[in-house]
Image (spheres, rainbow, N blue to C red):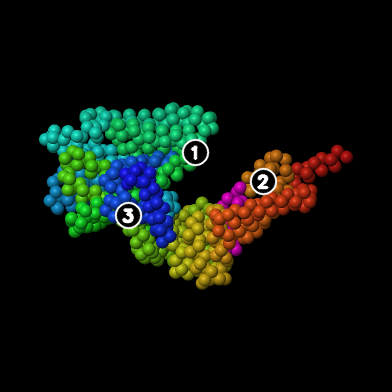
Amino acid sequence: MSGSLLFQAIVFLAGAIICVSLAKRFGLSSVIGYLLAGVLIGPYVLGFIGEEGEDILHFAEFGVVVMLFLIGLEIEPKNFWNMRKSILGMGGIQVALTVGLTYILFAFLGYQWQVSLAIGMAVALSSTAIALQTIKEKGLMNTTFGSSAFSILLFQDIIVIFMIGALPLLSNSEEKAGSTDTHSTATLIENLPIGFQTLAIILSVVLIVLAGRFVVVPILRKVAKTGVRELLIAAAFLIVFGISYVMEFVGLSPALGAFLGGVVLSTSEFKHELESTLEPFKNLLLGLFFMAVGASINFVVIANSPLTIGVILLAIIAIKALVLFITGRIFKLKIDQNVLLTFSLAQVGEFAFVLLSFAFQLNILEQEQMDMMLVVTAVSMSLTPILALVNERFILPKVGTKESIKRPMDHIAKSQKVILVGFGHFGSTVGRFLRSHGVEATILDFDSNRVDFLRKMGFEVYYGDATREDLLESAGIAEAKLLICATNKVSVAKAITKIVKEKYPNVELLVRTKNRYDAYELLNLDVKNIYRETLDTSLALASDALNKLGFRKYTLNRQVQNFIKYDEASLRRLATEPNRDDNYIFKARKELEQQEKLLEDDFKRGIVAYDNHWDSEYIRKQLGKSNES
């Protein structure tokens, strides 16, 4: 029964649901939940998954491929080219230093130089899956840390191609001759001269670019014309599978090929459709990947050599952390961003499984050496979310405090009447509008690089985590009249709200929210002034649409105000209801019916229908009539 595909599916899904739910319940990353689920259902705990766990891991790596395809879709070629310096610079320094220091470590431990170099190459690669999933989950992709981490990870995904090509050079001729089972890993460029290998790589990239432009997009257009959504889903998977197969057949990284395919298609009209189609599958496959990593941890190997594995694991994490910190300093990352980078990429990544297995097939590594490094790789990946949590809870607050103290806090002591938290696109618009009317605000933001840039642009922006009471005090909250929370993270808004409501009740809160459900949470915390991102913009669009259909602008402006008034009242009435149960759905439907009826009655009663104030079209008609008479 345990070998049944359905049984395995039930085990994986049940493990994911239970463990990820528990992880989120305790405020942990979903990655920790997936890894824990893998450990529990693996062969060394509950034993639901046996030796087939390695095969599942290879299948689950497709989640990494899909993820990189979607990341490629988000990056236009122009932006990719603009990142070339950080990709080559940060990525090159990180890989070179990590390979060198790891080589020295294992040579010191008595390993042959070929073994030391092969392990060094594997160790230099961080986990794209874990790092990017965590970065996106915490909304840090657009920070300096997020872009730096992405640059390093992308370089690693590119350099793995050359590492795979270099591994056969580390195997002596006798070992190559004795290895007869390597045909399964043979690729198109494996036996070509170096010059032809380079040419094959260039031609492969050109082929992907041309296919994306002149083959894939026309096919997608024809599929879209059928109106059958499942065909578009099939086409999306065909693209990813096809690109990955071509790259793997040539001997390159399928993940890199998928990324390039995504970049090529990022300017097509199908960009958002492909994103929305593949996103659910990506998350599911990544979850399966993390669980497979957890299940692959060989506790027998750990039990046999716990001290050796522990020392090597700590040494590797320390080496990678040191190199990452040095790389960040070279590229002048601020201390908080650099610490985030250091803790996020200090693990060994999923491509190490590929390199280590290939090195074993080439007889570079012995069985014992490979088993040990596979365990070190899996455990380091499992420790990453825990290290990130320790960093977030204990290290970063202290580092952040020091960094904020270094900044000119005497200027903050001016204590403006308005404190503005978050200075992204939304917050900067608010800040500019206030300043244009002579109202200065004390602006707080948690991205120190963005703070420095905005200060050069003339804004008084200060670094710091606004959920810390000491920072709010130094920003002058005791004397402030208003605190505007312009961040898009409801968790930050809730934390700030609790502090202000408890300690500074005289300060009025104005809070941005993404949607109706975030607004419910803040309403239940007694926040009076809530501003939903989508409300005003969607009503402005609807108003313009009706105006183009012949409705008067003034009439529409009045109706927009009525709509907001009725919707805000409805929002407050529904805030205490659970958002997903049947009672909420019933009451929400009644509220919608009542709201539409009130708007219709307003129009029919003539409160708005015959109100011609400031209606330029009506005034022009009346003036025309008077001129005629």
Start-end of magenta stretch: 527-538
Residue 439 in the image: state x and y as whole percent.
57, 61
Q: Check disc 1 and give the amino acid type.
A: Glu
C-alpha gap between disc 2 and disc 1:
27 Å
Q: Identify the residue under disc 1.
A: 273
Residue at the location (22% across, 32% down)? 183
Residue 530 is one of the magenta-drawn residues: yes
Residue 570 in the image: state x and y as whole percent.
64, 57
Q: Is residue 174 left or right of residue 522?
A: left
C-alpha gap between disc 2 and disc 3:
55 Å
Direction front: furthest residue: 1
Q: Identify the residue under disc 3.
A: 40
Screen quadrant of the N terminus? top left
Using the image as rendered, state which of residue 244 and residue 469 is in the foreground. 244
Residue at the location (18% across, 38% down)? 362
Tag on residue 574? none
Q: Check disc 3 and give the amino acid type.
A: Leu
256, above or below 200, in the image:
below
Q: Identify the residue under disc 2.
A: 543
Q: Check disc 2 and give the amino acid type.
A: Ser
The crowd level at tag 3 (other Cα within 10 Å; few <14, some 14-19, many 20+) is: many
Q: Please, what secondary structure does the residue beneath circle 1 have? A: helix
The crowd level at tag 1 (other Cα within 10 Å; few <14, some 14-19, many 20+) is: few
Q: Earlier in the sequence, mark 2 or mark 3?
A: 3
